[in-house]
Image (cartoon, rainbow, N blue to C red):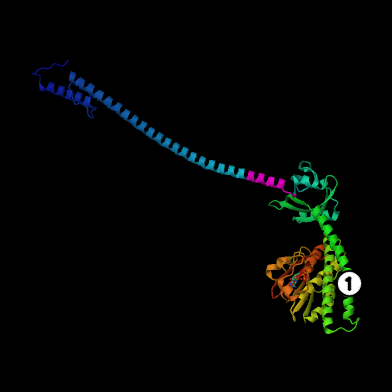
Amino acid sequence: MIFIGVSMSRSITEPINEVTKFANKISQGIPQQSIMVTSKDEVGILATAFNNMVRRLQESYATLEQKVAERTKELAEKTEEAKNSERAALNIAADLKVEEGKLSEEKTKAENLANDLKKFKLALDNTSDQVVITDPEGTVVYANASVEKITGYAPEEALGKKSGALWKSPMPLEYYQNFWHTIKELKTTFIGEIQNKRKNGELYTAVISVSPVLDEKGDILFFVGIERDITKEKQIDTAKNEFISLASHQLRTPLTAINWYSEMILGGDAGKLTKKQKGYFNEVYTASQQMNDIIKSFLNILRLETGTQTKNLVPVDLAAVSKSVLTELHLQAERKKLRILEKYQKLLPSVMTDADLTRVILQNFVSNAIKYSRDDGEVSISLEFVTKGGAADGKTATEDSVLTAVHDSGIGIPENVQDKIFSKFFRADNAKKQDPNGNGLGLYMTKIMVEMIGGQIWFSSKEGEGTTFYLLLPKEARRVV
Ligand code: ADP
């Protein structure tokens, strides 16, 4: 215990003051230094106790500070982590939004596609033409509603069956060989007329177009066949053809008489004619000749169009045919003072073809070349062998062939009508001016005849400069139905 008195010496009061000040300091915060009281009395003990307390306090404070720092660091790290997680979450959300957008785009696309397909199927189902899709073996995998209207078989009945076994066609074997060769080997579209049988046994005529659908490797995925029933049109056609045939034959008899008597009168059999009479009878004779030509063309077209024109394939020497045509037409050529050139390749092989049809084709080419030449012009006929794959003036020969080219330096064919040249009755204006007597049937017939013998026909021409007509005939006879 400390005893305090006025007389107390400084050595006693000073330490007490020091301790009191120190106690005050402690009440305001933890002092940094210790108290320096070294006496061994109670004040000294108190000071030592204060010092110990302060040291412990300092230690605890330091530990606390360290913990606070650690905790703060931890918290900061956690906050950063949380921020990162938040950022990641935001990124994921953004990605999800993009994915969602893509998905909805894909969904819309799929829906549109499904709608298109629906519309497409609806259109196919309701088209008046028969549409059949088969696998590469000819088994029906789709048939539209018109199949029933045309054949009598419901689409469900047709599915899974071979198309050939359904509408048993009476077409010849040759037709089918050509059909399969075209769509399976050449892998191109087959277009042709066919006779098929309906479910009730009735025969009908149709135009068919069958195309192979290929994958990227060129293998056949399936065939799409479109068929149009043309039975009624055929019947009308037959009736029309019968009428033309009858009318033509009926017209021929009086025409022969007009021709015959005109020739006799012009030949002086009925006495001498005045110049005027001769002129009139010449007109009658030319007109009756023209009419005769038209009737002959009509009858030829009838034969070609109705398929009654026969063909007889034999080895034909095209150079010999060309020479004979030129001999036949030499008077016309001489009248116009034309120079005729013949360019025949040596050792030209014969071609398997119909001699008569080939002759008519060359006759048409040469007579047109003469007809549409100007006086003193030049007409040339060339014949050359073209091997399979070889170039034949703008075309490629698909087999060993002979190319005939008839060239003239005449009026040419105007560019804007070149696509009409093989149409029935078509004549270009410059041709009508040059020779009013044509009928526009020659090239139409020629094209049909060329197709009958399995050849190809085309031309190149420049108005005012000249024309070349080409005929490419395969060396071996091609199957043509
Ligand atoms: P046509 O000679 O009786 O008029 P074609 O059927 O033989 O009938 O020919 C049809 C048309 O093709 C002719 O009217 C003519 O316009 C054109 N043509 C054919 N060959 C030639 C040619 N060598 N030069 C110019 N035009 C031609």
Residue 316 in the image, given as x and y percentages of width and height = 86, 69
| Residue at which label 1 appears | 256
What amino acid type should be assigned to the residue bearing mark 1? Thr
Residue interval drawn in magenta: 113-129
* Above or below 448: residue 271: below
Q: Is residue 203 magenta?
A: no
Q: Position of residue 227 (x, y in %)?
A: 77, 51
Viewer-nearest residue: 296 or 196:
296
Disc 1 is placed on an element classified as: helix
Name the residue: 82% across, 63% down: 452
Image check: 23 left or right of 406?
left
Q: Quadrant of residue 289?
A: bottom right
Of 371 and 476, nearer the camera is 371
Question: In this view of the protein, can residue 477 be seen by the observer?
Answer: no
Disc 1 within 8 angstroms of ligand 1 (CB): no
Measuring 22% from the left and 29% from the top, which residue is drawn there?
33
Q: Is residue 41 above or below residue 59?
A: above
Which residue reaches farthest right?
269
Which residue is located at x 56 percent, y 44 percent?
105
Q: Is residue 96 above or below residue 366?
A: above
Quarter of the figure that contains the C terminus: bottom right
* Residue 31 higher or lower than 455, as above or below: above
Quadrant, the N terminus:
top left
Answer whether residue 124 is magenta in the image.
Answer: yes
Find ligand 1 in the image and state its quadrant: bottom right
Residue 175 is situated, as x and y percent measured from the top left of the image, at: 83, 55
Q: Is residue 192 left or right of residue 64?
A: right
Residue at image coords 45%, 39%: 87
Residue 209, position in %: x, y? 76, 54
Give the main secondary structure, helix, strand or loop, of the magenta stretch. helix
Q: Dot 1: within a 10 Å radius of its alpha carbon, few (fewer than 14), some, or many (20 or more) residues?
A: some
